Amino acid sequence: RVKAVREEPLLVISEVDTTTVREEALNQSPAIYQAAAQAAAADAQYSASFAQYLPQISASYSRSWSGQEYNELDPSWSVRLSASWPLFNGFSRELNRTRSAVNRDNARAQAEDARRQVNAQLTQHLASLTSAQTRHEIALVSREASEEDLRVQQERYRLGAATIVEVLASQVNLDQAEVDIVQARLDYLVAKAQIEALIGREL
């Protein structure tokens, strides 16, 4: 007698709060965080490039005593203040500033691209997750129906009202339902792992 064997669950499929996950992905994603840090560093470098146009000021102070007797020493002191302001240095300042501006703009664009890419990837992975959940539910219903059909066909075969081919066909349908359940669970795991990689934590 042909008998169906039920697969043990590979995991428990749970609901995911997509709104919270999306907020976390856009605020805490390692890829977005890294791109934002690089953009901030480029902004700081560009701001620092303006210092090349400022004058350089230095100051010094000295104090001394002179005389032949210790109790008759005359104090003296001096203060020096100097400033330098290079008006022309072969356009190196302008070149450095232009490079800093280009790096800043590129870093900002990359940060925005990172946000868009993470958002698009998350949308795709959430869709895969939802699809896996739906297919899992359908496969469970299909398995239940296939089990009942196999039971009926086995009973009909016992009574001589069905052929072995009909029993085997029913068994194939049940086996396919089991395969669909396992595949849906595996697809769920893959989508879940991809989402976890985006948000930097386990769901």
Image: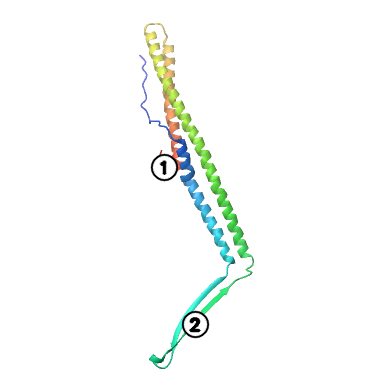
Q: Quadrant of residue 203?
A: top left
Residue with the mark numbered 1: 201
Give x and y (percent) for residue 85. Answer: 59, 71
Crowding at dot 1, Cα within 10 Å, few <14 / some 14-19 / many 20+, comes out as few
Amino acid type, mark 2: Ser
Q: Is residue 5 left or right of residue 83?
A: left
Work out whether residue 154 or residue 57 is closer to the camera in this orientation and state it.
57
Give x and y (percent) for residue 163. Answer: 42, 9
Residue with the most extreme bottom position: 68
Residue with the mark numbered 2: 78
Look at 48% across and 34% down and name the residue there: 126
- Asked if residue 165 is positioned above or below residue 135 in the image, the reply reads above
- Asked if residue 111 is positioned above or below residue 120 in the image, the reply reads below
Look at 49% across and 46% down and name the residue there: 31
Q: CA distance from mark 2 to mark 1?
A: 64 Å
Give x and y (percent) for residue 81. Answer: 53, 77
Q: Quadrant of the N terminus?
A: top left
